[in-house]
Amino acid sequence: MKWTFSIFASLLIVAAVYFLTQDQMTYEQLATKISEVVNPPEVKKETEAPAKAQEVIAEADFYIAPDGDDKNTGTFTAPFASLQRAKDAVRELKKTNSGNIRVLLRGGRYEFSETLVFSLDDSGSADGTITYAAYPGETPILSAGNEITNLQLAQTEIEGLPTQAQGNVLVADVTADFRTLYDAEGILPRASSKGFITREGGGRNKILIPKDALKNWSNVEGLEVMVRPHHAWIRNVLPVTKLDYKKATIETSIDASYVTNPLHFLKDTPNCWVENSIEELDEPGEWVLNPTEGKLYLWPRNDTNVYHPQLNEIIRVEGDIDFKGPEDTPVTNLTFDGLTFMHGERYTLTKDDAGLQHDWDMLDKDNALVRFRGTEQCAIKNSHFLHSGSGAIRVDLHGMLNEISGNHIEHLGGGGILLCGYGPGTKDVNRKNFVSNNHIHHVGEIYWHSPGLFIWQSGENQISNNFIHHTNYTGLILSGCMIDFFQKRGRELGRTLRLHEIGNTKQIKTDEDAIPFWHSHDNIIEYNEISHSMQKLGDGNAIYIRGAGPNNIIRRNYVHHLVTPMIMQCAIRTDGGQRGTIINENIIYKCTSQGMMLKLDTTFENNIIADVIYPPRGYYLSLREGPLTGASIKHNIFYSTSSVDDFINELDGKRAGGTEDRRGRAVARVQDADTGANLFYSAATPELAQAAVAELESLGTGKGSIAADPMFVDPANGNFQLQPDSPALKMGFKPIDQSKIGLLK
């Protein structure tokens, strides 16, 4: 009877939660919650020596502890030592238990020298999930780092070492080859030259540098060059093969993404550095690895332990992938919960890599601490990713109905989360994933272009309530393949094409031709908060979409404080050729240069753009790439407290043929869109708002638009709720509930 009452009460609670949050919980999710109440996880009773009477033991089928032993039975009092041993034990238990199975990891450090692979044999059942979780209240740390214990202060002068470093550098004999190093503060910076500007005329694997920048760097075999090749949106890391002092050139073994000329539009900005030379080791925290000598040199910045990475991936969940075939067999019902991952290696480019858009990442690459490669209904939750050279989480190729939620991702050399489907073709099996409530910040610390969240060739996903901030480039990218790349075969996008499925690519000339092969469609990007993106690179955004297919919805996001003084940036941007995108009910506040860039048939309704930072530019709504036939610009609020406002900016179309640029794209004109009922306000100069309304009227568009104070509650402190008498409400503006945006508490 007591059991029946407990279940009944629990069901009432779950039902109440649903009706209170029905805009966020589907009926399917409610059914799952009920199932969890009626069918609680099955646990195995402890049969060995009981723990102390006063200690409450968290129940599980198996336990792991750093001081355990793989010869043990895996009980609370006799835990295993490794995840590998627990995985083997779970496989045995599955033969007699088809329900939920739970493995708990006690707090402490677990070192990995090899990637732990979970395969089809490690799937949960149709009726149960296998979970590897942190013991309640404890922090198990899964580290790919190996401690360097033989560092000693150099007893003699080190040849080539700058004077200020002599007497401060530790030296160790090492046999491992590694590209990142860690102490308790995180990634240690490698010794680096001062930045310089490359000369014109370089190639992809030959860099022309100023003669006064070329030094007699030793350790050529270990040198790497960091280069921003011509475009502002990328930073390559390339191994050096040759220094030519007469010609002042650097040759590399891997091609850069573009020719290594000075930056386009930023010709006075240094775009090249040389790393890992003893001649540049001149500050605390810097280090050099000389692979020829087998020696590590480090000027320590503190007295904590130092670790070098041993692998890129710590955990890989891998199904049976038929890469060229039509079907895969995924691992299912496997969950990781509450774990900490650290000290992975920084990935390198290879000659066979297949780049995603602009080489922002690579197809099917082993460059994340946790990688799902062929999974369905698997999850990584409430986990912490930090101090690592590559990315945190990837869902590659076949990935459906997976959950990535509640994770904290910080201080990584690569990106945060990547959903990466198969390349353009007919195989569409990366979709319907749930990415929510993740806190992502300070990523891309080595590969500056790495975004916080990247969705490529992946559709029907829900991306919600994530907080992304302090990224060196774009916060969130949603993309696929641009039309012109269907005709190319280079590293960027060309190698991702599934030619055996597409057929004759020369026939792909329009969006209609490409839509069957674009899989980043029907995504919902909502309730996310993004701030302080674009810390170092240019020509980027907080949210970016291109080549992604139709019916993507970007709504109820809060983008604010893009404060780096870079002309080439925007809060939200649709880019060349992107169609069928709905951008509604977003708030853009204090973003530098441009608020929203709208192209083609984008729907842009019920948004707030407030206080765009200038100089440079100061455009609230940039219209680029027409015609805007089918576009909608309605019920938006443009709010300014400055004296210089450009609320709607168009190009003048004075180029030959009246086109936007050399690619021949038509100029976007506001009168070609369905434009109306927008509110403009300029607190410092009211006539600017009035002029904006008058300009629309003169073009025969903008019906119902007004110049008025929208009456926000407290805009200076980011509160854009409307007061009851707001004229925006009378115009049909729907209030945006800011309390639902960002991380869930």
Image (cartoon, helix red, strand yellow):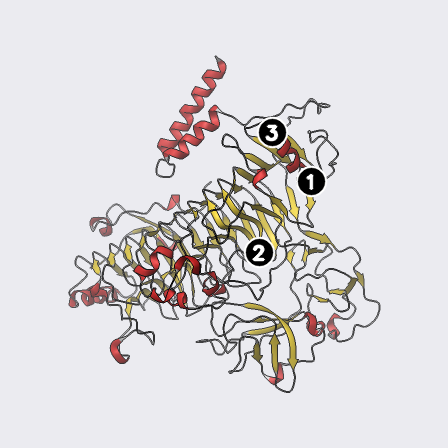
Residue 637 in the image: x percent, y percent? 28, 56
Residue, disc 2: 367
Residue, disc 1: 82
Q: CA distance from mark 1 to mark 3?
A: 21 Å
Residue 621 in the image: x percent, y percent? 31, 63
- Please say if 239 is above or below 301: below
Q: Quadrant of residue 477?
A: bottom left
Q: CA distance from mark 1 to mark 2?
A: 23 Å
Q: Are marks 1 and 3 in contact (CB under 8 Å)?
A: no
The answer to whether residue 298 is left or right of residue 385 is right
The answer to whether residue 666 is left or right of residue 75 is left
Q: Amino acid at mark 2?
A: Asn
- Please say if 49 is above or below 398: above
Which badge, 1 or 3, is on the more N-terminal residue?
A: 1
* Residue visible at 55% across and 68% down in the picture: 236
Is residue 532 at least partly visible in the picture? Answer: yes
Is residue 337 at least partly visible in the picture? Answer: no
SS class of the residue under badge 1? loop
* Number of the label disc, if any, that sits on residue 95: 3
* Residue visible at 17% across and 57% down in the picture: 704
Q: Amino acid at mark 1?
A: Ser
Residue 676 in the image: x percent, y percent? 20, 58
Q: Quadrant of residue 699?
A: bottom left
**Front position in the image: 635 or 25:** 25
Q: Are marks 3 and 2 in contact (CB under 8 Å)?
A: no
* Residue visible at 57% across and 61% down in the picture: 445
Q: Amino acid at mark 3?
A: Lys
SS class of the residue under badge 2? loop
